[in-house]
Image: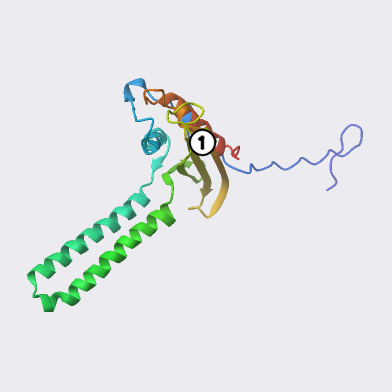
Amino acid sequence: MAPRKDVKGLSPAPSAPARRPSSVVSSLPGPLSVSVPLEEREVVKVNNYSPSELKNACDDALKRYLSRPVLFKQIHLHTDVRLALGWAGVFTAAATGLYGWKTDFEKSKLGVWVGFILYLVLTSLQTLYSYFVEGDTIFVGRRKTFSKRIITERITISSRTLPVPSSKLSFKPSPTNSPSYSLSINYVQSTSGGKSLLAKGRTHEAKQYSAFFDEKGVMAQEVFERWIGELVEAVMEGKGA
C-alpha cells in the first residue's frame, strides 16, 4: 500500500525512533537531599596534631552519613573476613595450647607443631587480606531500586592521609600546613544481578583536614557532609574525574 501524502503531495518524513537513555537514574534520593537532624549529631573532637585521629574521625563521619536507611546499606564483608580469620587464629592457638598442656610432651609435639603452623597461616592470611584486598577501603555500600526491573547501585570508597609537603612543615597545624584527607570513590549501577552494566563513575579528590576541624579540634560535620555529598552525587551523575 502506497504511503499517504500530505496536502502538497509530499510523503511525510518517517518518525525517528525513541532514543534509549545510556543509564538509568535512581529514583532514590542523593546524600545532599537528606539532611541530618541536629538532635542526631554528637560533638566530635580530636587532637589536631594526630593524623590518625583526624582520619578516623572523618572515616566514621562518612560511614554515618552514607549508611543512613534512605541511602546505602553498608556491606561489612572485609570486616567479617578479617574477624573470621582472627578468631580462627585465636581458637587454633587456644586449642593447641590446651592440647599441649593435657598431652604428654613427646606425644603432643606433632600436634603442637601443626597447630602452630596453622596459626601462622591464619595470621598471615589476615594480614595479606587487609593489605592486598581490603587496602584503604573504608566504605562499601549498596542499594536497590525497582523500576520495571531491579537496579543495583554499589559504591566503594577508599581514604588515606596525604602528608604535608616538606616545604610547608610547621610545628603548629594551620590551613596552610595541614595534612589532607584523600578520597577515591567508585560507583557502579547494574541490573540482572550485575550482569548488565548501566552506568559507572569514578572520582578522586583531597581536602585539608583544617577545612573540617577548628583550632580546638572540633569537627564541622555539616561542612564535611556537604563535601562528601557533592562528591558522591557527582560520581553518580557521571561527572566524576
Amino acid type at mark 1: Val
Residue 164 or 131: which is nearer the viewer? 164
In the rendered image, residue 81, in percent from the top left (x then y), is placed at: 33, 55
Classify residue 39 as left or right of residue 110: right
At 92% from the left and 32% from the top, the residue drawn is 8
At 22% from the left and 58% from the top, the residue drawn is 90
Residue 239 or 48: which is nearer the viewer? 48
Numbered marks: total? 1
Give the colour scheme of this rendering. rainbow
- Examine the image and state in which quarter residue 20 appears: top right
At 8% from the left and 75% from the top, the residue drawn is 104
Instruction: For residue 86, say whether it is visible.
Output: yes
Classify residue 112 as left or right of residue 14: left
At 23% from the left and 68% from the top, the residue drawn is 116
- Examine the image and state in which quarter residue 39 appears: top left
Residue furthest to the right in view is 8
Question: 173 above or below 120?
Answer: above
In the rendered image, residue 34, in percent from the top left (x then y), is placed at: 44, 27
In the rendered image, residue 112, in percent from the top left (x then y), is placed at: 18, 71
Residue furthest to the top in view is 38
Residue assigned mark 1:
232
In the rendered image, residue 124, in percent from the top left (x then y), is placed at: 33, 62
Quarter the C terminus occupies: top right
Residue 111 or 39: which is nearer the viewer? 111
Instruction: For residue 30, say whether it is visible.
Output: no
Q: Determine whether the residue tagged by mark 1 lies in a helix, strand or loop.
A: helix
Other-residue count near label 1 (Cα within 10 Å), few / some / many at <14 / 14–19 / ≥20: many
